[in-house]
Image (spheres, rainbow, N blue to C red):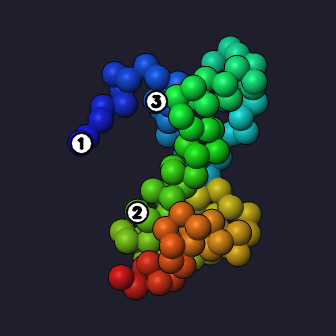
């Protein structure tokens, strides 16, 4: 099922739209996002919890989707993909990617 985020007014969709504008290399901290929506960090977290998720889950999904696209569509090194998805250390990216997908980025790109 394809969901049109543009017409979705949930907090999740609003955050996703904001993060796509920023890009995965510059994902803001939760307090910056809360300020953008004129609310406190606590209110933002509460609203996301009511919807059944967290800000970190949205960031992780965006980073994971971006990493998968870069691994499958482009001939970039793991280090370059790590940077493009906002990680300062390649090892941290590799751990996160394995946690998200169950396989290392190098194994994923060989598929």
| Residue 38 in the image, given as x and y percentages of width and height | 68, 14
In the rendered structure, find residue 69 and report the number of the disc placed on it: 2
> Disc 3 or 1, which lies upstream in sequence?
1
| Residue 26 in the image, given as x and y percentages of width and height | 65, 46
In the rendered structure, find residue 1 and report the number of the disc placed on it: 1
Label 3 sits on residue: 13
Q: Nearer the viewer, mark 2 or mark 1?
A: 1
Numbered disc 3: secondary structure: helix
- Marks 3 & 1, CB-CB < 8 Å contact: no
Up/down of 33 relative to 38, above or below: below
- Marks 2 & 3, CB-CB < 8 Å contact: no
Query: Dot 1: few (<14), some (14–19), or many (≥20) neighbours within 10 Å?
Result: few
> Disc 2 or 3, which lies upstream in sequence?
3
Kindly report the distance in space between the C-alpha atoms of the residues bearing marks 3 and 1.
Answer: 16 Å
Q: Please report the residue visible at 68 percent of the width from the left and 29 percent of the height from the top.
A: 45
Residue 65 falls in image quadrant: bottom left
Query: Dot 3: few (<14), some (14–19), or many (≥20) neighbours within 10 Å?
Result: some
Residue 32 falls in image quadrant: top right
Up/down of 28 relative to 73, above or below: above
Kindly report the distance in space between the C-alpha atoms of the residues bearing marks 2 and 1.
Answer: 19 Å
Residue 74 falls in image quadrant: bottom left
């Amino acid at each position: 099922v394809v969901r049109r985020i543009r017409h979705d007014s949930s907090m999740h969709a609003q955050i996703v739209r904001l993060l796509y504008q920023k890009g995965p290399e510059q994902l803001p901290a939760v307090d910056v996002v809360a300020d953008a929506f004129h609310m406190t960090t606590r209110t933002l977290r509460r609203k996301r919890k009511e919807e059944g998720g967290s800000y970190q889950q949205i960031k992780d999904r965006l980073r994971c989707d971006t990493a998968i696209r870069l691994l499958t569509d482009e001939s970039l090194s793991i280090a370059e993909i790590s940077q493009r998805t906002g990680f300062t250390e390649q090892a941290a990216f590799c751990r996160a990617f394995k946690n998200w997908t169950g396989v290392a980025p190098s194994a994923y790109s060989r598929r």
